Amino acid sequence: MTEATYTHGHHESVLRSHRWRTAENSAGYLLAELRPGQALLDLGCGPGTITADLAERVAPGQVTAVDRTASVLAAAREAVEARGVTSVRFAVGDAHALDFPDDSFDVVHAHQVLQHVTDPVRVLREMRRVCRPGGVVAVRDVDYAAMTWFPEVPVLDEWLALYRRVARANGGEPDAGRRLLAWAREAGFTDVTATASTWCHATPDERRWWSGLWADRTTASAYAEHAVSGGHATPGTLESIAAAWRAWGEEEDGWFASLHGEVLCRV
């Protein structure tokens, strides 16, 4: 296995974020390409909220949802079944070596995956291999260095620098968004449309949700364990960062934006 260590892990604070994701807020750049009857691969499906949305759009086409751990797939299956979606099958797999024949899918999708793998170009080549001629490979990843917020909170600058150190030590690339076009071209794609979109958290409820999940993630998730065990931070440092997140979340003028890179690659 050439997967990098998944920095976030699957703590509740991480899944709280993942379950918020929909096709509309996380795969809008892809929706115009979807048609009923398409076969779609959702690589790194997580808890399945985007998967279910995509499945509804390509029904009666078959969707295959892949993730690296069975426990994640069990949660995804439960979420998809709760929606009454019956056209999704689930498989444990390695993004670097997909267990599917060439030309298996019309659409191959990955959201927030390439930032967590050791060889994103190899993953893109695998996505291209399993995509049929005339199909599309669609990838979206955040760019941590481009995250921005107000009011300025110096401790959150420390948070960002720390997260990027930990992610890179685990073999990932936290600033993946800006690199997607270059990676796609290196993987052999010649027809690539590169775009960007954002998440923005600025209402009181959005601030509480975003700051709360990052405060919890900073002290209780696998990311926190990696930060301490890797010598990147002390528990006291993590507590101070979590407190800064909670303080930012109470700011009436609080605003946070995350930039995402996107590529639609035609095969």
Image: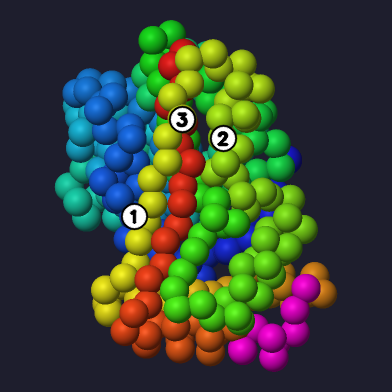
Q: Marks 3 and 1, Cα distance to the nearest angstrom?
A: 21 Å
How crowded is the residue under tag 1: few (<14 C-alpha within 10 Å), some, or many (20+)? some
Residue 220 point in image, percent of width and height: 57, 80
Q: What amino acid is labelled 3 in the image?
A: Ala
Q: What number is the disc on residue 194?
A: 3
What element does badge 2 sit on? helix
Q: Nearer the viewer, residue 87 or 161?
A: 161
Q: Are marks 2 and 1 in contact (CB under 8 Å)?
A: no
Magenta range: 232-240
Q: For residue 21, which numbered disc appears in the image?
A: 1
Number of numbered discs on residues? 3
Question: Residue sitting at 58 percent across and 26 percent down?
Answer: 184
Residue at (45% x, 57% y) in the render: 258
- Which type of secondary structure does the marked residue at label 1 adopt? loop
In the rendered view, would you say 182 is above or below 230?
Answer: above
**Residue 162 visible in the displayed image:** yes
Question: Could you tell which of marks 2 and 1 lies nearer the N-terminus?
Answer: 1
Residue named by callout 2: 180
Q: Say left or right for 136 vs 128.
A: left
> x, y (%) of residue 206?
31, 72
Q: Is residue 220 visible?
A: no
Query: Percent x, y for residue 133?
Result: 43, 8
* Residue 233 belongs to magenta span: yes
**Disc 3 vs disc 2: Cβ atoms closer than 8 Å?**
yes
Quarter where residue 47 is shown:
bottom left
Q: Position of residue 115 (x, y in %)?
A: 60, 47
Magenta: predominant secondary structure element? helix
Q: Residue furthest top?
A: 133
Q: Earlier in the sequence, mark 3 or mark 2?
A: 2
